Image (spheres, rainbow, N blue to C red):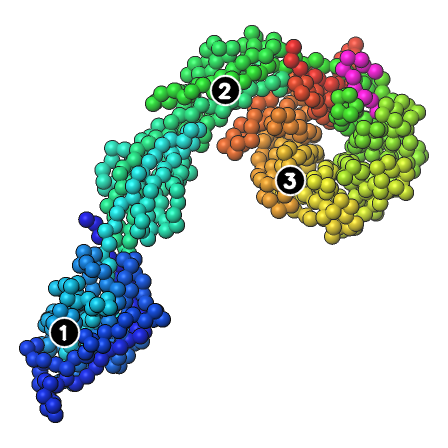
Amino acid sequence: MTTARLTHLLPGILIAIFISSCSTGRSGESVMQAVQPAESWQLPDVFSADPVRDASVTYTHSVAGFQCELSSGGTVKDEYKLALDGGGAPAWGIARFNGLPAEPTEYLQARMNISDVLLGESYYRLLADFGNGRWDVQEVTPATTAAGINILAGFDPALHISPNGNTYVGLLTAAPTVTLDIIFFDIIVDVQPPMNLQASGSENGDSIQLSWELPELWDSYSLYVRLTGETDDDWQLLLQGSVELAGYTHDFGDFVLPCQYGVDYDYQLTVTVAGEESAPSNVASARRELPAPELRVSQGLYRGFILSVWHMPAGTGPLDYDIYRDGVLRQADMNFILPDGGTFADFDPAANDGEFHSYYVIAKGPEGNSPPSQTVDGYAAIVDVQRLVSFDSLHDPHADVFFTAGFSSQPVIAYYNEAPRKLVYHRYDHDNPSFGANVADAEITVDISCQSDFNRPWIAYNNQDSGIKAQGLWIARGQDDSPGSGDWDNYLLYPGEIVGRRVSMAFVNGQLAVVFTVRVDLTHYDVKFAYALNSDPQSELDWKVKDLLAPGLSSFPDVMMLREQDGLPLVAMARQDILRLLRGKNGAPTDEAGWDNSNLDNTLDGARDLDMLLNDGIVSISVGGCQVEGTGDLRFYRCTGTDPTTDPFESWVIRSYDDENAEMTDLYYRDGIPIINVPHGMFSSANTFVLEGVDEYLLEGNWWSYYYDGFDSSVNVRYFSRMFGDGPVYRTAYMRSWDNGGNTDWGIYVATNTPK
């Protein structure tokens, strides 16, 4: 039997200790001699005055279920000790305990601690015997000046428990001084070990699940682990707790012993009662079984190959993989140094026909193979490139594209044609090419922004040339859902020189809003937030224009992007070194105090472009052209929660370029996968950078950057790029050069990725 000792310090209350000079019973004679156990003393008469337990008395409750009342008298010392001073005459301290069980010796012992003992003096333990109505006196001989006396040695429940359930014990001495501590009761309990410890690998293979049953009596429990085959000296404490749990999950992130795939672990559990640990439970053993990979397969993201990406739970480590296409082994024993997943680009011409092909993956470990992954279909894109409009010379078209289901799934492109200095609107129809409609004459120097409310298109643009019309921010309002060249209303929303990379327009609570920057004088700028007062603002009188930041800034934002989040305006802003996010405290904030403001990064060193999207309520931002001594960085930021003003952002530098021409960073989500489209550099390509999943262990360096499709690499791609699409088809609008009979002309092209 394993036992544990519970020590209860019983407070010095309700003490009825009797301290007396004792006589031999002969009247008038005082005994002033050393105490002799054979003599009869006038000890307290507990036999005729044995009280019934008073329900009002506060008792100490022990684990074993008995109550005791400790009586005190004499001189109290240190608030919890009783000082007896016989001065040569017998003195005693006696305590009454109530409710002792009938068989206390099986799991109960008692002692009283005494100190200030004078060696050579006599000390006696007292125990009231209700069988003969006398006190049992037993001499004790402390070996040191402080000792513990077993006050229940020779205890007989039939003799030493009164009819009222009381037991009286005490100490008798004639020594001049002795300090009697409050009596301690140590309950010796049969500490049962935990039962039914079970361990098994989780279904998805990421951990080992443990469960157990605790005994009725425990203070705390300890879970131990070792590698199977190790000795008892190798047990490590994995978990210790005092709050009952149904079980525990041992996974790769465990600090004590990370749970690895393919390793066998032993577990055992103990409980502790009052510092005494039980025998261990049964030993349970388990291992993490290799789970099936989680597979993604690209669908039209790339031209010329089909990309498969698979993930394994953290901690599986490097493995080999077999990849199957259409039920036939395509690639065997692929090995990856990087743990927890892998990739395979299928460049086989038989797979690059635009048709759907099915893939699955099997992981192979030293202890066997995983089940097959789910079967996923994918296809390589058939990229159809069409020229939408042609320019005689290179210029920044200051364009924008939006995709609206309300326009029969046709994207709308607005762009600036520099040679005739006209703003042009074009609804793209892949099967029926057409010319665009002239919206307005203007000299546009800042990227425009266009939107649709399903009734009509809207375009926000600047005019720099006061010889054409007033300088400032203009709004073009289509008169219907398919306006021609004469079907536009143009009005000046805000006068002045508009600066920065772009104006940005969005719908907030169903009404238009736009952010822009205006020059105040040579060295000062105002950043503005304008919002419409109704759903169809037909003139500048239908708008309010307010400060977004404190007026009179010494520098202006390089680029801004406006979106809506839960009915609130949300602005991403790159200004000098700082990437900042602002969210209105309501749908129409009236000054800079009406915005919550959060700095996300202060290392941009300038930025050429940014884009911001919300995917499943999570804000993501791409930033390009971060310039550091002639280089350009491409960066990606993602909020860890749904409140971008308080929840932290994660960030990654996806690529660094040897020039500054990562000029656009169009961000697009397709089936939950972020895609960044980057026209990059002189005589370079339109590169589509794709992240095949958002798991943290894949967001490292070139796990982004080299999954790209240079879908138009034979020409010079510059300035402008936007992605849009629906279902299995998506498109990219961009600007590139073309050979016009030996002359280099420029145009806006649309590349369509589609299955066959």
Q: Residues within 10 Å of mark 3 (few under 14, many from 20)?
A: many
> Which numbered disc covers residue 374?
2
Cα gap from disc 3 to disc 2, whole angstroms: 41 Å
Element at badge 3?
loop
For the view shown, which residue lies furthest in the bottom direction? 28
Res 335 quadrant in image: top left
- Who is closer to the viewer here, 374 or 349? 374
Say if 73 sits above or below 738 in the image. Answer: below
Residue 149: x and y in percent read 16, 68
- Who is closer to the viewer here, 152 or 349? 152
Give the residues drawn in magenta, as a range. Answer: 425-434
Amino acid beneath label 1: Gly
Which residue is located at x 79 percent, y 44 percent?
529
Where does label 1 land, which residue?
133
**Counting residues from the N terminus, which is met first, the one under dot 3 or under dot 1?**
1
**How many numbered badges does the structure rendering display?**
3
Residue 435: x and y in percent read 85, 17
Element at badge 2?
loop
Res 506 quadrant in image: top right
Where does label 3 land, which residue?
604
Which residue is located at x 81 percent, y 47 percent?
546
Which residue is located at x 88 percent, y 41 percent?
542
Say if 547 sits above or below 42 in the image. Answer: above
Mark in front: 1 vs 2? 1
Mark in front: 3 vs 1? 1
